[in-house]
Image: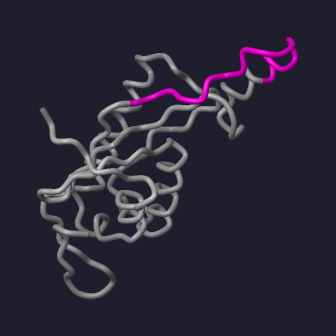
Amino acid sequence: PAGLRRRGACGRMESRGLSATIERVEVVERAATEGGILERGLGILKSRVTFLPEGQHAVYHMRVQNGDSAIHVVKRFSEFAQLHDMLVRRFGPSLPADLPTKTLIRHFDPGQLDDRKNALNAYLKELCSRRDVVACPELQRFLFHPAAQVPARAAP
């Protein structure tokens, strides 16, 4: 991407102003409220248990700034977890950041969502501060995947 310059082998790049910041969290796909008691009960369960793919979940609206250009990317926590797993395999204990822990029960309390947003922002800041991590293809795909991005609006 623009703003990154190759330096040597193994995909090393030098970052010039790369940052990623979660601007807001959105809770989407509401639980089932229609149907019989069994359907509603299953809907509530699916909306609260992390390892079930259906139901209510949070998405993180991220602004990725790369030099003078910015894009808007939307990610779920599970995508952050997949990225983290790939980065741990690549960098091992030298990875500069810890991902907030995944919870078994989904929490949609605004305070808890804000805490997670702040923890993910700290995680992203650490990742973007390291040239070797910024140059990593896994992080590049995560931040710049074309299916999940739209041009970001200028800040007011």
Question: In front: 102, or 108?
Answer: 108
Numbered disc total = 0
Residue at (28, 64) in percent of width and height:
134
Residue at (86, 12) in percent of width and height:
37
Please provide percent x and percent y for residue 44. Answer: 72, 20
Residue 115 vertical placement versus 74 (above, below): above
Q: Quadrant of the C terminus?
A: top left
Please provide percent x and percent y for residue 9. Answer: 29, 87
Question: In front: 89, or 10?
Answer: 10
Residue 68 falls within the magenta-colored stretch? no
Which quarter of the picture shows residue 147? bottom left
Q: Is residue 84 left or right of residue 119?
A: right
Which quarter of the picture shows residue 118? top left
Please provide percent x and percent y for residue 101. Answer: 51, 38
Residue 126 vertical placement versus 37 (above, below): below
Q: Is residue 39 left or right of residue 121?
A: right
Display colour scheme:
one colour
Residue at (64, 32) in percent of width and height:
104
Q: Is residue 113 left or right of residue 1?
A: right
Residue 34 falls within the magenta-colored stretch? yes
Please provide percent x and percent y for residue 22. Answer: 32, 38
Residue pushed farthest bottom? 9
Q: Quadrant of the N terminus?
A: bottom left
Residue 10 vertical placement versus 147 (above, below): below
User: Bounds of the magenta span?
Assistant: 25-42
Which quarter of the picture shows residue 138? bottom left
